[in-house]
Amino acid sequence: MKIAVVILAGLCAIALADRDGQVYGQVPFKTADKQHNQIQHDILRLYKYVNQPSYYKDHVEIANSYSLEANIQQYSKPEVVEQFLYYYQYDIIPRDHIFSVFHEEHLKQAIALFRVFYYAKNYDTFYKTAVWARNHVNQGLFLYSFSVAVLHYPATYGIILPPIYEVYPYYFYNAEVIQQAQQYKQQYGYQQQQQQQHQQQDGYSGYTIRANYSGYYLNVHPEQSLSYYTEDVGINAYYYYYNLYRPYWLNYEDVYVNTYNRGEEYYYFYQQFLARYYLERLSNDEGEIKVYDYEEPLETGYYPTLVYPNGLAFPQRPSWAEFGKNYYNYGQSYSYKSRYGYSYDIVQDYERRIRDAIDAGYVKTEDGKVVNLFEEYGFNTLGNIIEANPESPNSRYYGYLQVFARHLLGYAQQPLHKYQVAPSALEHFETSLRDPVFYQFYKRIVIYFQKYKNYLPHYNKTDLEYPGVKVEGVQVDRLVTYFENVDADVSNAYYVNEEEYQNDNYHIRVRQQRLNRKPFTYKINVVSEKPVEAVVRVFIGPKYDEYGRHISINENRVNYVEFDTFRYQLQAGKNVIERNSEDNYYSDDYVSQYQLYQQVNSGKDYQVYGQEVQYTYPTRYLLPKGKRGGQTYQIYVIVSQYKAPDHQQEQQKQQQQHQHQYQQYVGQGQEQRQTYYYPIVGLGVPNIDDYPLGYPFDRPISQKEFYVPNSYFQDVVIYHKHANEINASNQPQDYESAQYYSANQNYGYNHNYIYNQYNEQ
Ligand SMILES: *[C@@H]1O[C@H](CO)[C@@H](O)[C@H](O)[C@H]1NC(C)=O
Ligand SMILES: *[C@@H]1O[C@H](CO)[C@@H](O)[C@H](O)[C@H]1NC(C)=O
Ligand SMILES: *[C@@H]1O[C@H](CO)[C@@H](O)[C@H](O)[C@H]1NC(C)=O
């Protein structure tokens, strides 16, 4: 969290952080430079009321006069412009229709538009293209392609995107919130709104909606008690941004991608994400993430209480839904136009082939060449196959599993026309995490990867030990979580007229309870025989299952969340390594787009770079929710020898090549400003050395070999408190266990407790 992970352009390797949290590479602008400020300002303006055409005079002028054909020489690859124009003129998703990256035709157009942005020879062209596209192409298509472009285009490195839940509240707040915003907007004009001002204690001049999670109105399934987690706007935004940084379709020919780890990173992201979710389930007395069969009815139904901007509801999936073709597609079209109609077969074919490949130990390319899976980078190859990224040796055969699985499981209807679709929640990155089946599907994927790992020998003592180094203990502060109110602006949930657009003074905000945790420190006591360079890994994992049974280490190893990893220079003798919850790379809350806008316009130096902005997992969810009486987890620490990544040199060479390409079309002087925010894989932990991701839990464990002196398990208890108790001083340590605990027993599911807090405030 401390410092953004920023690397010189062309050196966009995963950040290497030393023990002070310093990041090798270029540190971002602490103060705003003028040119950068201007770009930030331009970009923010383009996101305003993105569902309507822009009313800004300068935008309208460019949108009406700019021509891609006439400026084709302004793009370093004119053919990408021709490709896009072909779509634009003959076959493109119309404005106001629903866009989904998981629909092949939509994705093709999104990639085409992304390339047009990306190959603009200079910022001026990039900007004009964006303004033109903002008013002419489909809103969802623009939003997606443009956001991917901003993150990867050299001239816009380090630019902050406004929080996606403010840009597109439809995908983050439930229908009743959107409805309330629109209702209020219809009833009250700007003048009346001002009169509300004195009713707001904090001087906010606008209306405040209190948003609840879907468990407030629905009780579809006991898992709804987790809706505060699955619907958290920060976690959902993180998943969205992660996929903007690392689109599965992103081609190495276009953009530098670390191909050495790409597939492995894909695995590790989901493995960690599921492990984190499992911890949250345990806090809510939900056990393992469920498994399902495609042939059997699926227990977990899902009612997304979301509406599309055009008023259409998101498709729902009843409990015990059947997927067999006859059930799912009955009466629906089976012609070419509904390739998704065959998802049931396609998904099962792809999964079977993947399982077979793992057992066989090799895959074949389209022309029959054999690629061995059990050699160096073999695991990475497996990841490429399952992700179906451009590095996949054979995506015709191993296919696009996640695309079809999302369609099938989301239970969307087969559209009659490719542009008149109502995709399910799983078919948008913004909303995927809300459906419990998301986790069930990715659990299958993680199990396939583990099937591979189970063929590898377990780590022996030699692999795990660090001779001469011993961890003697770990002391952790008292760990406390609580819910608190967090505000966000939802002005994009309604439409404004030209005057309101330009003055931008009509605001409505949403106040919602979100989890947080108190800051904490932990100390690791290490004794070393001599001064050595080490890497310390810290994990948090469960100890007991939902019934209070101890989970054996070999079962449990996939449940450990890596939450801190850093290099450390050990001295001879005793070392006390003190770390705190702010030392890692988890994200602070995103700055509201209006604050961001004001900061940029103020002309003053502002500190948003490198501080608040980090597209990683939200730091407020660093710990799983505790319990009134405490919930036990375990912290695991292992101190290992530092091993520099061995492919670093090769990687740098490739990056330099890419940088060379950039310089051909990015104007002079801009290369100094090229800093690149690279997302950290996993939740908030940089990949800093040469161990496999997830080491040492990534392989099966031999009880005899695993417990080495340079590692340590420590039980920790996480408590959950009421927000009012957090700052109350001089409370007895176990205050919560007396009156509050018994009071809280009355509310069946935990989420009721959250809602109840509204009444108490
Ligand atoms: C959320 O719940 C509170 C009461 O617990 C209620 O006052 C409020 O209207 C609800 N919000 C919405 C948008 O329904
Ligand atoms: C431990 O495993 C490594 C390979 O990972 C092997 O080279 C080594 O000989 C093994 N050591 C023992 C003591 O079995
Ligand atoms: C506790 O106090 C600090 C400092 O005044 C404040 O920033 C924080 O929001 C408070 N926390 C809660 C939960 O009230």
Image (cartoon, rainbow, N blue to C red):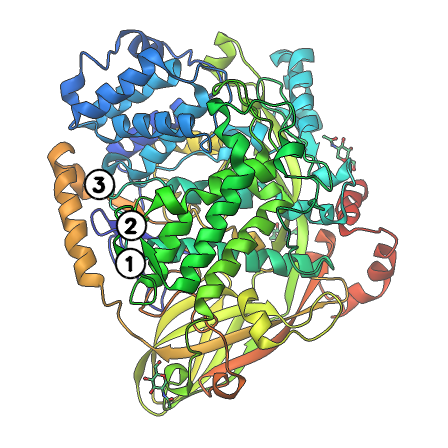
Question: Which residue is at a point 64% across and 39% down the rendered structure image?
Answer: 323
If you read the primary sequence from the N terminus, does the residue marked by circle 2 or circle 3 appear first?
3
Question: Which residue is at a point 67% across and 46% down the rendered structure image?
Answer: 228
Q: Amino acid at mark 3?
A: Glu
Q: Is residue 61 shown above or below 461?
A: above
Residue at disc 3, secondary structure: loop
The residues bearing labels 2 and 3 have C-alpha atoms spaced at a distance of: 19 Å
**Quadrant of the image for the C terminus?**
top right
If you read the primary sequence from the N terminus, does the residue marked by circle 3 or circle 1 appear first?
3
Residue on which the image places disc 2: 365
Q: Is residue 215 shown above or below 5?
A: above
Q: What percent of the width, then of the height, locates residue 631?
A: 70, 67
If you read the primary sequence from the N terminus, does the residue marked by circle 2 or circle 1 appear first?
2
Residue on which the image places disc 3: 253
The residues bearing labels 2 and 1 have C-alpha atoms spaced at a distance of: 7 Å
**What label does residue 345 carry, if any?**
none
The residues bearing labels 3 and 1 have C-alpha atoms spaced at a distance of: 22 Å
Q: Decide if residue 231 is in sight here.
A: no
Q: Are dots 2 and 1 in contact, CB under 8 Å?
A: yes
Q: Quadrant of residue 156?
A: top left
Residue on which the image places disc 1: 371
